[in-house]
Image (cartoon, rainbow, N blue to C red):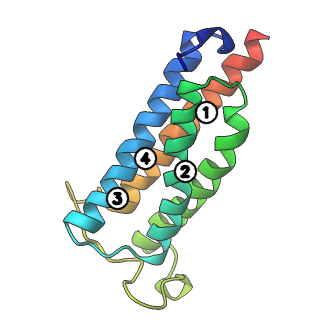
């Protein structure tokens, strides 16, 4: 089935969805690279963040192929929950929230620092950037569609 751009309000919407797809795909492939290639064992919070990121790849891809202006309604709850988990994980990493409030009771502690680029970029921070970027793109999409009507 060919792409039908008549169902999408304009090319700006397509751009927002495409970049959201790209960010979620990079985040998904990055998390798989860290766990499967680099053998970094994910903590519980990392698993929860993955649970909310992985479906976004498919939602945005399907929306690119079959345009639907309701993508905000489908993707926004997943992004917000993933973003909240990411914020909590980063607060644990920064020691703002004590380790005893961590859900990681077995296996790898949630504060383990597998990656530390430039002294501050960690895997949870990368997840936070991905979720925040997608959240901003979805809000921009929603506002653009609201004012277009």
Q: Is residue 147 left or right of residue 97?
A: right
Q: Gap between marks 4 and 1, in whole Å?
A: 14 Å
Q: Of the residues under marks 3 and 4, which one precedes in the sequence?
A: 3
Closest to the camera, between mark 2 and mark 1, is 2
Asked whether disc 2 touches disc 3, contact meaning CB atoms under 8 Å apart, the reply is no
Picture residue at 41% right of the left edge, 76% below the top: 43
The image quarter in which residue 135 lies: top right
Q: Which residue is mark 1?
A: 138
SS class, disc 1? helix
Placement of 114 over or under 102, stated as above or below: above
Q: Which residue is mark 2?
A: 55
Q: Is residue 34 left or right of residue 144?
A: left
Q: Gap between marks 2 and 4, in whole Å?
A: 18 Å
Q: Of the residues under marks 4 and 1, which one precedes in the sequence?
A: 4
Picture residue at 54% right of the left edge, 82% below the top: 103
Mark on residue 31? 3
Closest to the camera, between mark 3 and mark 4, is 3
SS class, disc 3? helix
Mark on residue 129? 4
Q: Is residue 115 visible?
A: no
Q: In what quadrant of the picture does the N terminus appear?
A: top right
Picture residue at 70% right of the left edge, 24% below the top: 69
Asked whether disc 4 touches disc 1, contact meaning CB atoms under 8 Å apart, the reply is no
């Amino acid at each position: 089935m060919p792409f039908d751009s008549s169902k999408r309000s304009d090319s700006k919407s397509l751009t927002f969805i495409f970049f959201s797809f790209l960010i979620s795909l990079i985040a998904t492939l990055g998390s798989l690279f860290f766990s499967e290639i680099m053998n970094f064992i994910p903590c519980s919070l990392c698993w929860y963040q993955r649970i909310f990121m992985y479906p976004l790849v498919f939602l945005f891809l399907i929306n690119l192929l079959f345009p639907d202006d309701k993508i905000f309604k489908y993707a926004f709850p997943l992004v917000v929950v993933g973003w909240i988990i990411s914020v909590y994980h980063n607060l644990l990493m920064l020691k703002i929230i004590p380790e005893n409030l961590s859900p990681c009771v077995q296996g790898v502690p949630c504060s383990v620092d597998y990656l530390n680029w430039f002294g501050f970029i960690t895997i949870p921070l990368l997840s936070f950037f991905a979720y925040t970027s997608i959240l901003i793109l979805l809000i921009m999409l929603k506002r653009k569609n609201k004012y277009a009507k």
